[in-house]
Amino acid sequence: MTYKRLSRTLLATLAACLIGFSSPGHAQAVDEEPSALAMTGDLVLARPLLLATTVVGTAVYIVSLPFSLLGGNAGEAGAVLVKGPAEATFVRCLGCTRSGRKQATVTE
């Protein structure tokens, strides 16, 4: 398998997982007020590391899938290796420490 084909396969798998796991209807409300420093650190350091963790977790999940299917814990492995890092990367307000969407504040 060539590197280019493997890259395309991993990117397609990652895209499919992100579409499946990033439903805003399942997100919890977050009541945090992060500072500018927390937002900057999250954007510059945490999000790229979490994205890398999501990609590596997806690759590990794919490699371990035959064994987890035999063991009966494929869903649990997917939740820990792919869904958790993907939620922390994409379904979390900038600078917040908990995953979930921040509800818009309506003022009259």
Image: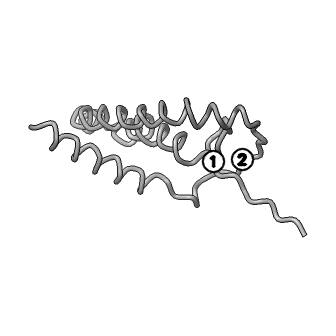
The Cα–Cα distance between marks 1 and 2, rounded to whole angstroms, is 6 Å
Which mark is drawn over residue 100? 1
In the orientation shown, which residue stands out farthest toward the left? 1
Report which quarter residue 20 is drawn in. Answer: bottom left
Say what secondary structure mark 1 lies in.
loop
Q: Which colour scheme is used?
A: one colour
Quadrant location, the C terminus = bottom right
Element type at mark 2: loop
Residue 55, given in percent of the width and then of the height, sits at 36, 37
Name the one closer to the observer, 40 or 102. 40
Check contact, mark 1 vs mark 2: CB within 8 A: yes
Please rate how many residues cluster around mark 2, counting C-alpha atoms within 10 Å: few if below 14, some from 14 to 19, many from 20.
some
Q: Tell me which numbered mark, 1 or 2, is placed earlier along the sequence.
A: 2
Q: Residue at x 48, y 30 (%)?
A: 49
In the image, residue 16 lies at what x, y percent? 34, 54
Give x and y (percent) for residue 67.
24, 32
Q: In which quarter of the image is the N terminus?
A: top left
Residue type indicated by callout 1: Gly
Q: Describe residue 83's horizontal placement relative to residue 10 as left or right.
A: right
Query: Which residue sits at x=77%, y=46%?
Result: 31
How many C-alpha atoms fall within 10 Å of the one at disc 1: few (<14), some, or many (≥20)?
A: many
The kind of residue on which mark 2 rests is Val
Residue at numbered disc 2: 30
